[in-house]
Image (spheres, rainbow, N blue to C red):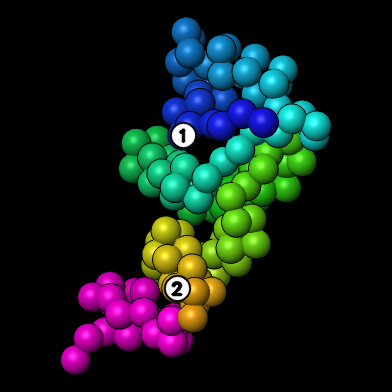
Amino acid sequence: MIGLDTNILLRYITQDDPEQSPHATRLIENRCARQSRGRITLAVLCELVWVLRSAYGYGKPQIVAVLDQILITAEFEIENEELAWKALEVWRTGPADYADYLLVLANQAAGCEQTYSFDAKLARHPAVSLPD
């Protein structure tokens, strides 16, 4: 197994850098296999969403499609894959950010009865409250 950083995934997905993109493509296509997968952490997924939106101008539907593809790719091992999927499912229709939903769901999985945030969009989730 090998670990994959956000910049490797970005070069592979966007093919935007004539020097780095071919290296990223060869790495993923030659080193990531069902027998020896490429590991993607939750932090990398969050960073990927943020960079695709802020630096590349991807819209939410495009980013959802990218995450869907990453999560179903057998050649990738996703850190806490079940949590990554749950956060994606909530984010599809929710107004807050992917990372925010990931945080709330991770807190729930750890036994937190409520997550507090000043993010009004996130507070629409039933497990989130604005502080008094």
**Residue segment shown in magenta:** 112-132
Report if residue 101 is visible in the image: no
Question: Would you say the residues marked 2 and 1 are in contact, meaning their CB atoms lie under 8 Å apart?
Answer: no
Report if residue 110 is visible in the image: yes
For residue 126, which numbered disc appears in the image? none
**14 lies above or below 103:** above
Q: Amino acid at mark 2?
A: Asn
Residue 83 at x, y percent in the picture = 58, 63
Quadrant of the rendered structure where residue 4 is? top right
The residue under label 1 is 6
Residue 103 at x, y percent in the picture = 42, 66
Q: Residue at x 30, y 80 (%)?
A: 116
Category of crowding for the residue at label 1, using alpha-carbon neighbours closer than 10 angstroms: few (below 14), some (14–19), many (at least 20): some
Q: Residue at x 72, y 17 (%)?
A: 30
The residue under label 2 is 107
Quarter containing the C terminus: bottom left
